[in-house]
Image (cartoon, coloured by chain):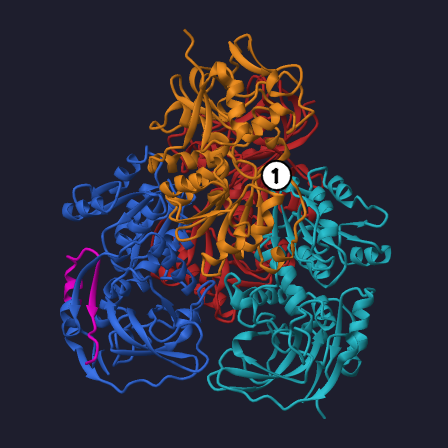
Chain colours: A blue, B orange, C cyan, D red
Amino acid sequence: MKAIEIQGSFGLENLKQVERDEPAVKPGQVKLRMKAVSLNYRDLLMVQGLYDPRQPLPLIPCSDGVGEVVEVGEGVSRVAVGDRVCPIFAQKWISGEPTHEKLRSTLGGPYDGTLTESMVLSEEGLVKVPDHLSDAEAATLPCAAVTAWSALVTLGQVKAGDTVLVQGTGGVSIFALQFAKLLGARVLVTSSSDEKLERVQAMGADEVINYRTEPKWGKVARERTGRVGVDHIIEVGGAGTLQQSLRAIRIGGHISLIGVLSGGVSDVNILPLVMGQVKVQGLVVGAREGFEAMNRAIDTNQMKPVVDKVFSFDQAQEAFQHLEAGKHFGKVCIEIPSKA
Amino acid sequence: MKAIEIQGSFGLENLKQVERDEPAVKPGQVKLRMKAVSLNYRDLLMVQGLYDPRQPLPLIPCSDGVGEVVEVGEGVSRVAVGDRVCPIFAQKWISGEPTHEKLRSTLGGPYDGTLTESMVLSEEGLVKVPDHLSDAEAATLPCAAVTAWSALVTLGQVKAGDTVLVQGTGGVSIFALQFAKLLGARVLVTSSSDEKLERVQAMGADEVINYRTEPKWGKVARERTGRVGVDHIIEVGGAGTLQQSLRAIRIGGHISLIGVLSGGVSDVNILPLVMGQVKVQGLVVGAREGFEAMNRAIDTNQMKPVVDKVFSFDQAQEAFQHLEAGKHFGKVCIEIPSKA
Amino acid sequence: MKAIEIQGSFGLENLKQVERDEPAVKPGQVKLRMKAVSLNYRDLLMVQGLYDPRQPLPLIPCSDGVGEVVEVGEGVSRVAVGDRVCPIFAQKWISGEPTHEKLRSTLGGPYDGTLTESMVLSEEGLVKVPDHLSDAEAATLPCAAVTAWSALVTLGQVKAGDTVLVQGTGGVSIFALQFAKLLGARVLVTSSSDEKLERVQAMGADEVINYRTEPKWGKVARERTGRVGVDHIIEVGGAGTLQQSLRAIRIGGHISLIGVLSGGVSDVNILPLVMGQVKVQGLVVGAREGFEAMNRAIDTNQMKPVVDKVFSFDQAQEAFQHLEAGKHFGKVCIEIPSKA
Amino acid sequence: MKAIEIQGSFGLENLKQVERDEPAVKPGQVKLRMKAVSLNYRDLLMVQGLYDPRQPLPLIPCSDGVGEVVEVGEGVSRVAVGDRVCPIFAQKWISGEPTHEKLRSTLGGPYDGTLTESMVLSEEGLVKVPDHLSDAEAATLPCAAVTAWSALVTLGQVKAGDTVLVQGTGGVSIFALQFAKLLGARVLVTSSSDEKLERVQAMGADEVINYRTEPKWGKVARERTGRVGVDHIIEVGGAGTLQQSLRAIRIGGHISLIGVLSGGVSDVNILPLVMGQVKVQGLVVGAREGFEAMNRAIDTNQMKPVVDKVFSFDQAQEAFQHLEAGKHFGKVCIEIPSKA
């Protein structure tokens, strides 16, 4: 089978297409013919050696993808040949709370990832995907969509009429906008690009704030809620944005802390957090049961993920460069051709 | 001021229009000029003497209505003259769990109700209503809508993609259908009338079942969920329907038990409840904080309550008879004219 | 290996000791040398053919027991040879909500049970037990203790200062008393035996009610809470007791519905359930994650299960007869001797 | 009546005893003869002008105290003359989530506080206290105890067997230790004083760590949990300790952020918070309903608050100095003599 590996040392230039042996299927396992992959910022950091420099190489990158079941091992009952499924990000996180062991079973490092023609995985580590999604659309679900779902639903319990502030227009943020609207919430989106803000308005965002022209966007957001503050914030910026988030959030509000975008080291005045009885919830994707619940929501509402651009398997480097450039709106995907 | 009283003894024929003194406003209180009232099945039972035969008379019936603030007492800060507000059903249930004391403060018995030109209430017992609603629409909120909201949101925590089964097309059920759709859920509705089922489909119901032609509707509902069962049931029928609900519900599912429709004495096999780890949650309207949250949801989504028919203040008896006849779809309302 | 089977047809007289082949260990599996077993009412019903008459025979009965790991298959990492572990009741219910599939994987029917010298199970279906427990004590945990834990902690979220009413002195009830005291709750226990009530008082029960001398014990319990009602009821009686429970429970209270003791067909007035916003939660044991959490609580507090009597492996019938007679207080156990 | 005021400008030296007119009782209000007061760190900061420099003076400081009801206004039903009650910290926070309005109604600033012979308050802003407590003990409850209760119970949902790490031996921390033990949890306490650590062990602390000799106490705490990490941390140090807390906490754990002790400006690496799916919950005392639940727990378990030293009303300055010196263990109280 063909696969893309990070070879020798980290760096986009070390992404190489290789030929590997087809993996064998043991009892309880399933073999997938991969159809499409989507890229996350984590995948880029991983290729660059910035996510986990101790990760042994070679490694097949990427955690998100979709494939077709082409072979099932002895005793497999959850899926059948022909099913279209996504591997879950943390292969051992089926349900319940995360643990160290569950969180160490992630694809695209330390486990080999999805940027390959074939994968063999435990039947437990798969979920079926809604029929109305294209392969590229389905490939976007495992990390970005599940993270947004965990933030708003599993952990955040957002309800109709709540106000949700979504930072930016990256993968998680666009899903958060879509899910928040599905749930009947009011949504504010921030971005530095008026063009992107127009696009989120077209998708249903109730209010937008350009944080370049409004650097004190936290105060602006608060004013847009009658000075009460927003109920929930999808915080992807980290150190650079948390202070404004603490201005925007209502007393008793909920901040989902997701981002590794701005480095992670922070100088934040945490006093408003105490005095406002604010909850800051770190989160890292989610369990398979949440993924399955999310798929029911996507299916019921015939929701479509936003795909920015689809690259071919031979253009994997270009796909990563496109992500790195940061001009995308929605997910960057790679399609894997059927073997002739 | 004019009001409608149950006079002398119970019975629709004893609903009489009377002249009472205008009530005085004490510190912390607010005077409302009532604009519209809506009827609940509880109000009908109360007038008939079937809800609480020990209720002293005369009593102004009805718990639901909307009025305009025309005077505020000393120290009032939550509302101002000119605000359009609904009285809350249990005047002392502001937030938190219900208590005996909170539940004894309900309008339309033991307290005088809303079918009157003027009411004086504590400022704590009021909520402002969304601007886009007509008076008749706003008058429907306090019991029927809040009950549906408590069932699905406060206690039920329904999320997008869940399947909600709604029994019938009464006031609570229609609101439950609307809220469930707002929340992104999939909704099944049962009714004995194909015409009503067509109407709920036009409102967004995903599936309908005529329980007259399908008396084993619980089994049918289960089949419509791939034999998994529905996540949540709005159970308004009581004894007559709980057994079918226990067939329809999924393992671990949630039944909101609301109805006093079919009398309340039951002969139910509770074994499936144990073996399926089902939760049955009795519920009785809800707190002011839930009402306020619901209004944000209604406002954000510009949702409109379904009003079946609006009667004039002089037609109060006819309004109750219309409710009693059971042919309505949505809420039965009474408008109260401005004093000349 | 030796095992006890229900042979030919149901009935205590058909419990027969047999010799079976030692089971082989596959990848991911673990072999246990069983040390002790405890009996549940479900096991008695199963042997009598009253629990599931369609269960194929022969069947090794009993779901609860403890064993020592004597062999581990390829890839096993959760346990090691020498560990003392309990099999979990529903072998596939690791965490999260129950499903049909999870609940069909129970020991003692449909799977062979614990009344045997050797078992081979998935490493996922085991939990380590606290060191301070004897084998007989450890054997009592999987059903009775986990059920009480799920009722009070996982689903009931009982907190210090809550009032818990425990019906009777059976296995689940005694554990519920012990856990409720661990959690800092106030506990009322009902029984028909003054002698048993003295024993529960010695164990820490704050109040006791003899339901033979006080058939309206629901009213008595309510009076003992200043007429507020109890917060939580461990309901094991079913049809015969639910009506009194509805008198005892406070507004907004929680009833854990566990019992199959009194048959399951019920004639209950459910109106108080609606009017009091009462939650009735059916429940069926619980997941492995709850079992593990419970073991931490037992360990931290050095809690000891109450063992009524320990029978030898040759006395299995007598053990079941002892349970059937209903004179026990705490759990009835069977020890399995080490092979010579 | 006599009272202690902050007069003219902030500073301990400006605490002056004054004579004020006895306050009058309006409808719905209650007059208390104060019996005892307890000091919180917030009170010290307030007197020093460090908590809210814009607070107008004079102000009667202190939020915590207990008094006897000596007069009730028209319509009062929650308490009666002779009842011993505590004022609640935020007078308008009865139940539900906090809001800006609820949190602005706190005693000891902006409202006059408890260091006075007489107070008049709304009947809604009071709770009855357990009989077994002395006046000084009862006076400790409103802030320190309710804060610990909110952290562990209302928001933290700590259960038996969980591991709770408590920082230091201040007022909130000692209550947290006591409540955690009531709940059946395992408790680790940190302190810089071996003598204090001995005292907490005598009170039931399972493990202690001297953070002076073990500055990397987060790692030590993690090791003491088999490298899993603790479930819950009572974080009172703020900036100076949060980093170690993030080392001590388990994946998915809960940090209650309470402290304003170390200033509030922080330089914290928040990446472990994201990667470990940690929840950081700011909190600010709690609602009356939590206070009432806590009192039931204290009563049921006959728990006694730890009083370090009781000063007389004439020694108010000395009491604050004693708190400022930081040598206390438990609460610093002031008794108010009965008027002759």
Q: Residue at x 31, y 59 (%)?
A: A145
Q: Nearer the viewer, residue D231 or A299?
A: A299
Q: Residue at x 59, y 20 (%)?
A: B12
Q: Residue A154 lies in what quarter of the image?
A: bottom left
Q: Is residue D170 visible?
A: no
Q: Compared with residue A48, is residue A217 higher up or lower down, i.e. above or below?
A: above
**How many marks overall?**
1
Q: Residues within 10 Å of mark 1 (few under 14, many from 20)?
A: few
Q: Which residue is tagged 1?
A: B262
Q: Residue C41 lies in what quarter of the image?
A: bottom right
Q: Position of residue A180 (x, y in %)?
A: 33, 48
Q: Is residue A337 visible?
A: yes
Q: Position of residue C298 (x, y in %)?
A: 64, 65
Q: Position of residue A297 (x, y in %)?
A: 37, 54
Helix, strand or loop status at disc 1: loop
Q: Nearer the viewer, residue A301 or B309?
A: B309
Which span is picked out in magenta? Answer: A320-340
Q: Compared with residue C95, is residue B319 higher up or lower down, i.e. above or below?
A: above
Q: Position of residue D139 (x, y in %)?
A: 61, 37
Extreme residue in the front direction: B213
Q: Would residue C62 appear left or right of A257 to someone viewing this image?
A: right
Is-magenta flag for residue B144? no
Q: Nearer the viewer, residue A37 or D282?
A: A37
Is-magenta flag for residue A330? yes
- Position of the C terminus of chain C, as image quadrant, is bottom right
Q: Residue A43 lies in what quarter of the image?
A: bottom left
Q: Residue at x 45, y 38 (%)?
A: B174
The chain carrying label 1 is B
- Position of the N terminus of chain C, as image quadrant, is bottom right
Extreme residue in the bottom direction: C340
Name which residue type carries label 1. Answer: Ser
